[in-house]
Image: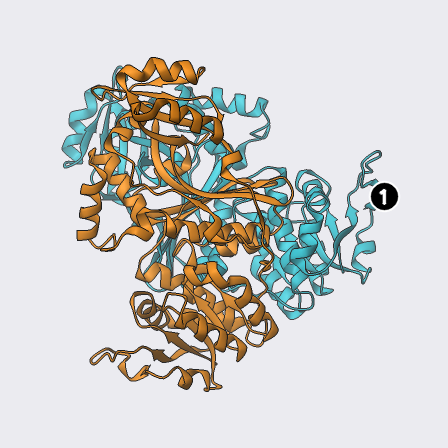
Chain colours: A cyan, B orange
Amino acid sequence: MVKVAVLGYGTVGSGVVQVIGDNGDLVSKKSGTEVTVKYILDLRDFPGDPYENLVVHDFNTILEDPEINVVCETMGGVGAAYNFTKQCLAAGKSVCTSNKELVAKHGPELLEIAKANNCSYLFEASVGGGIPIIRPIMDALSAEKIERILGILNGTTNYILTKMEKEGADFNDVLKQAQDLGYAERNPEADIEGHDACRKIAILASLMLGKTVDSEKVYTEGITKITSDDFAFASKAGYTIKILGVSEAKGEDSVLTYVSPFFIKKSHPLAMVNDVFNAIFVTGNMVGDTMYYGKGAGKLPTASAVVADVIDAARHVGKNVPCYWDAEEAKLADIKDASFKYFVRVKAESLEQIKGIAPGGKVVDGDVSGQAGYITPVLSEKVFAEIAEKLGDNMLGRIRVYC
Amino acid sequence: MVKVAVLGYGTVGSGVVQVIGDNGDLVSKKSGTEVTVKYILDLRDFPGDPYENLVVHDFNTILEDPEINVVCETMGGVGAAYNFTKQCLAAGKSVCTSNKELVAKHGPELLEIAKANNCSYLFEASVGGGIPIIRPIMDALSAEKIERILGILNGTTNYILTKMEKEGADFNDVLKQAQDLGYAERNPEADIEGHDACRKIAILASLMLGKTVDSEKVYTEGITKITSDDFAFASKAGYTIKILGVSEAKGEDSVLTYVSPFFIKKSHPLAMVNDVFNAIFVTGNMVGDTMYYGKGAGKLPTASAVVADVIDAARHVGKNVPCYWDAEEAKLADIKDASFKYFVRVKAESLEQIKGIAPGGKVVDGDVSGQAGYITPVLSEKVFAEIAEKLGDNMLGRIRVYC
């Protein structure tokens, strides 16, 4: 018998209670034991809610109840969530979480506490919502040296870019629509500036290496500078634009991890990932390319991933489910030393100038009055920065090209 | 310390030895113990092979060696492979396999023997080659009621269909090319008639239900009747043609499982799965649509999946890794009771006839001289059979439409 406590009765937390309720027989069968929710921790009351009698306001009720062996942390943030998680793990209660911020910031420490106390810290839901990605990397691809991870990791920005492409609309208009529909937050910075994707790629990069990639050191560029003109050029040249979290092995022990918008070929599997869907493209040294696709957010998909972790924790009560992620910091390569092709959008009269200073590239046509487009050959970031400086105000935009 | 024996030193078996060799540090780290190959069973000798001194000819050497706790069955077939697997499991040695025929035919029995002897029968490599699909269904989606599985499960037929689409070529010409390139067997029947896909979808359907779907009772239609004319119509109407293994839940305890070519919309994620790639589209009641993509065959991708199982077995020596698949037969729905839209290719002069007997459909143009195309409304298989009879020789081809 496994009794579960859910910390935070918001979107994901109420989804967890619903999944364990609706799919209860299945959850218990897969767990090999009956699984029920005993407490829901929230500051609020929920009169009329079918689970209102499970709501408690004092965390200690949960911590001190020896019947509780699995806790779902669906509060978010790195304050109380961190504190509660540490105390639960220290008391031998496994914690299953969707809190990517906490996993990115304190993952190795919490994994260590779990190991020392014969319980588990599980976080399938922290990346890719309902998409199984943590387990495939940890288990199904366990025999692989992972060479590269490329992910569409944020549903809000993917929705915005998809709309911009399909409707020829401008960023700000689509953002406003997305906010009205509830797909984007009133304060959208974490999504549109790439911070959310950054935390997720830092988690994946850490699992890829078994060492810690600090999300605060990851180069992160958002989508606020992408315009409908960029899409006009991309489309005519056979590309679309996606914001990707990227992690590439560089030699034996170094990794280049960053978030950036990219031109990607329409024939690439990631190009067909539209709207709020996410996908993660993982390349291993034996298996080659694999991809995982699904809803990257939303109440039930995310809750389903938390409950899959509950089942895993329930199967391993009193034991630690291992995770290969040490506190040691990974050696990060600097994006300044990386090389890319660049799509450059310039004033029409500057086309000859860029052809002269970045010879060997390809002119692309976007049918945009007064503008010209050019894809450079592969250049280092340093060399491209010099070119951009020479172009000055004649450069209207630039986007890296994935190739 | 885990010592492994590999049964069969063919394509996959030699891949397993290579993956454990090349990624040895990683395999041992993930296993939590050193993993090495001690024996390779084969009837042949391999003079000059770097592992020639591991080759043995007598299965009993392996069976009777108490040091061997994990065995990789990469022989194929249901004769000796079945016999050896049973003996290994009965002796408490876990077996990891890529043998889909054996898993489809004797899976539940072998799982039962494994459970009774505190060891495991693992078969990630039996479906989708290097694509993690067995584990995602069993673990990451463990909280889901799976409603539908749709898979491009055979690389050879997907290669043939992709070539036919891209080059406008005919089936027989592309089959010959595929044979010359080694992508299709000299005797291609298991692939082109859908038998290989049938075994794989039967395995996935069994895992979806936790009961046994007998592959011999699964309706299976291959791709030998698909022509370049079908692709001409599909392409102009915004479709491509793929052969899919399908398993759909029907009510609480029944399932409709079959293999058939389909018209699918070019915007569907499965439509971009080309060449020898495979993909499996899984829909759960909470998570919605998810998809898993990668190389469905090939030495190293398949071997990588076998070795992921070796790591799992090594982590659980003396214990059973559970699998929810009972011997009890699942209740199979009959495809005769199912309904589809149908693309019908007829002689040009018969277009009015089909519009008359299947009203409410859509005329599609393929620019093929003397032919017309029509997509019917949703009809039951029984009703469509009557229509096909009325059309007689005027019907040149028909393909189900996925919608």
In the rendering, at what x and y percent does residue A342 appear?
Answer: 27, 36
Is B118 left, or right, of B356 in this rendering?
Answer: right
The answer to whether one can see residue A282 in this image is: no
Q: Secondary structure at mark 1?
A: helix
Nearer-the-camera pick, B383 or B66: B383
Q: Residue at x 42, y 77 (%)?
A: B4
Nearer-the-camera pick, B232 or B377: B377
Is B324 left, or right, of B247 in this rendering?
Answer: right
Amino acid type at image mark 1 = Asn
Is B320 located above or below residue A52 in the figure? Answer: below
Q: Which residue is mark 1?
A: A53
In the rendering, at what x and y percent does residue B79 appear?
Answer: 40, 69
Residue A142 quadrant: bottom left
In the rendering, at what x and y percent does residue A79 appear?
Answer: 67, 49
Tally of marks:
1
Nearer-the-camera pick, A184 or B273: B273
- Which chain is disc 1 placed on? A
Residue A352 quadrant: top left
Q: Residue at x 29, y 84 (%)?
A: B53
Q: Residue at x 57, y 61 (%)?
A: B323
In the rendering, at what x and y percent does residue A212 appear?
Answer: 49, 59
Is B183 located above or below residue B15 in the figure? Answer: above
Nearer-the-camera pick, A269 or A78: A269
The answer to whether one can see residue B91 in this image is: yes
Residue A351 quadrant: top left
Q: Residues within 10 Å of mark 1 (few under 14, many from 20)?
A: some
